[in-house]
Image (cartoon, rainbow, N blue to C red):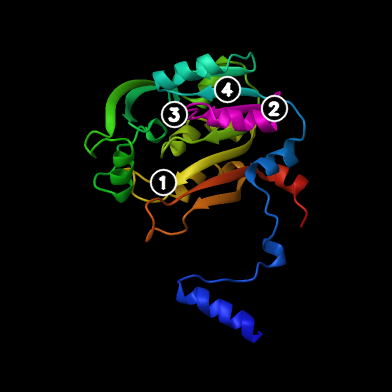
Amino acid sequence: MNKFKKIILNSFRYLGYNIKKIQKEERNFLNFDEIYKKIFGNRKIIIFDVGGNRGQSINRFLNIFPNAEIHCFEPIEKNFLFLKKNYNSKNIKLNNFALGEKNNIKNFYINAKSSTSSFNKLSKNTKWLKLRAKENKKNINSFTIEKKKTSIKSIDFYCKQNKIKHIHLLKLDTQGYEDKILSGGKNILKSGKISIIELEMIFDNVYEKYLTFTDIEKNLLKNKYRFTGIETCNNNLFEGILFFGDLIYMKEDIIKKHIKK
């Protein structure tokens, strides 16, 4: 290492930063959308957007697959009406209920920041809650603004009712309820008729319940789905206010068809 490089590295270390050379194999990572494009190409696919919120994922998926058939599930009425107003297309099916383990009615906790709403209660006195409450001009006790009885259906029931034979991409962003949704899809998972599953897993204690890989994989590994990709926010529990990851699980036969190793 020449003297000039050493001075630069030592200067950054003094400021608390570490610099390392990017290895060849670390470059040019595919993001999730690039992976999906690689797998499906220009085919017309069926996408389930579970946790539609205000259409962020609808926009994202239409950007990749303009002709996709999207089934969107959003239990909060205010958000659902926003979706209904802004997404008027025969290829977008909007549903004002949640997905879960079985057809049921359950308390849903609606928060001031609607994308954080969940069937799971928030943990009190976390740094995350204090910050989000402040951002939304609430105190920690009023951040959850409503507890509402909410209708739930299972994926298996919905697919049978709507004669859906195959889901190419199932996206789950439900604040710790992903395991229940997968449990409600036992039949379609067993049949192998879901190609790719993208889900969020929250590892920290923002909610009273957090998921583990075991919770998620109990319905996936036995049906020959394999953990295929991850994008994380933070990488540990000991710093920052939020630790979660977006994960991809994919059918093993699809992996074998496309992998180049």
Asked if the residue at tag 2 contacts the one at tag 1, i.e. Cβ–Cβ closer than 8 Å, the answer is: no
Q: Nearer the viewer, mark 4 or mark 3?
A: 4
Residue 58 drawn in magenta: yes
The residue that mark 4 highlights is 71
For badge 3, the amino acid type reads Gly
Q: Which residues are magenta?
A: 45-67
Secondary structure type for disc 3? loop
CA gap, disc 4 and disc 2: 11 Å
Q: Earlier in the sequence, mark 4 or mark 3?
A: 4
The residue that mark 2 highlights is 45
CA gap, disc 4 and disc 3: 15 Å
For badge 2, the amino acid type reads Ile
The residue that mark 1 highlights is 211
Return the mark for residue 100.
3
Q: Nearer the viewer, residue 124 or 20?
A: 20
Q: Quadrant of the N terminus?
A: bottom right
Q: Nearer the viewer, mark 4 or mark 1?
A: 4
CA gap, disc 3 and disc 1: 15 Å
Q: Earlier in the sequence, mark 4 or mark 1?
A: 4
Q: Nearer the viewer, mark 2 or mark 3?
A: 2
Q: Quadrant of residue 225 in the image?
A: top right
